[in-house]
Image: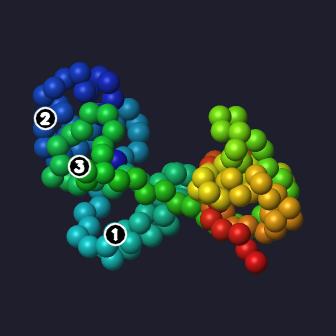
């Protein structure tokens, strides 16, 4: 469920204090006037229904090249700023795909000299690129001390497929392959 409150709306406390259904009605009127597309609201009551809704969303709205969807508790109040895990008001669903690459080296960590900054990788689809997240401190230190154990070794990573041009978008290390 996408619930956008721009600065103009949130300055009006009345708008933010309305129920979700009232806010959606007001936004629908505004979006239609601006010629914007408002994605449908899907109400789900179980993890299985959520999975089916996300799959439908992926198929039906692929043409909009959306990065993902916001999942929202419809009975939650409007939250200024970021929602927290404790509140459980909203969650972001983002599609990620997995691929494989070969480690060709490491870049240095600019802040911590005893850890790897990123794994330098190569695959035929993207050429050379870096993966800077997905590994813990212990693994990072081990890679820096023993690079020979990792150079030319295959790895698996995930990335966001939307807006990919010549490098994977926000790649995350998953595991080394044997």
Of 119 and 2, nearer the camera is: 119
Q: Residue at x 82, y 65 (%)?
A: 149
Q: Which is closer to the viewer, label 3 or label 2? A: 3
The image shows residue 63, relative to residue 51, as above or below, that is above
Indicate the colouring scheme. rainbow
Q: Which residue is mark 3?
A: 87
Task: Find the distance from the CA under tag 3 to the CA under tag 2.
Answer: 17 Å
Q: In the rendered structure, which disc, 1 or 3, sits on the residue that comes first in sequence? A: 1
Of 42 and 117, nearer the camera is: 117
Q: Residue at x 52, y 51 (%)?
A: 67
Q: Which residue is mark 2?
A: 17
Q: In the rendered structure, which disc, 3 or 2, sits on the residue that comes first in sequence? A: 2
Query: SS for tag 1?
Result: helix
Q: Residue at x 26, y 73 (%)?
A: 46
Q: In the rendered structure, which disc, 2 or 1, sits on the residue that comes first in sequence? A: 2
Q: Are marks 3 and 2 in contact (CB under 8 Å)?
A: no
Q: Which residue is mark 1?
A: 50
- Expressed as whole percent of the image width and height from the top left, the position of residue 135 reads 62, 57
Task: Left or right? Give the position of 25 relative to 84.
Answer: left
Query: SS for tag 2?
Result: loop
Q: Are marks 1 and 3 in contact (CB under 8 Å)?
A: no
Task: Find the distance from the CA under tag 2 to the CA under tag 1.
Answer: 27 Å
- Expressed as whole percent of the image width and height from the top left, the position of residue 47 reads 31, 73
Q: Residue at x 27, y 41 (%)?
A: 28
């Amino acid at each position: 469920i996408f619930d956008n409150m721009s600065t103009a709306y949130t300055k009006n406390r009345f708008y933010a204090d309305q129920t979700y259904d009232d806010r959606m009605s007001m936004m629908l009127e505004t979006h239609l006037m601006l010629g914007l597309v408002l994605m449908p609201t899907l109400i789900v009551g179980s993890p299985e229904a959520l999975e089916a809704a996300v799959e439908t969303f992926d198929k039906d709205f692929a043409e909009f090249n959306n990065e993902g969807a916001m999942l929202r508790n419809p009975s939650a109040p409007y939250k200024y700023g970021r929602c927290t895990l404790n509140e459980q008001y909203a969650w972001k669903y983002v599609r990620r795909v997995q691929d494989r690459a070969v480690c060709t080296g490491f870049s240095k960590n600019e802040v911590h000299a005893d850890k790897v900054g990123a794994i330098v990788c190569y695959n035929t689809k993207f050429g050379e690129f870096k993966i800077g997240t997905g590994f813990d401190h212990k693994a990072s230190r081990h890679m820096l001390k023993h690079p020979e154990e990792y150079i030319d070794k295959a790895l698996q990573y995930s990335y966001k497929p939307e807006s990919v041009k010549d490098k994977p978008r926000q790649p995350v290390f998953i595991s080394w392959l044997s």
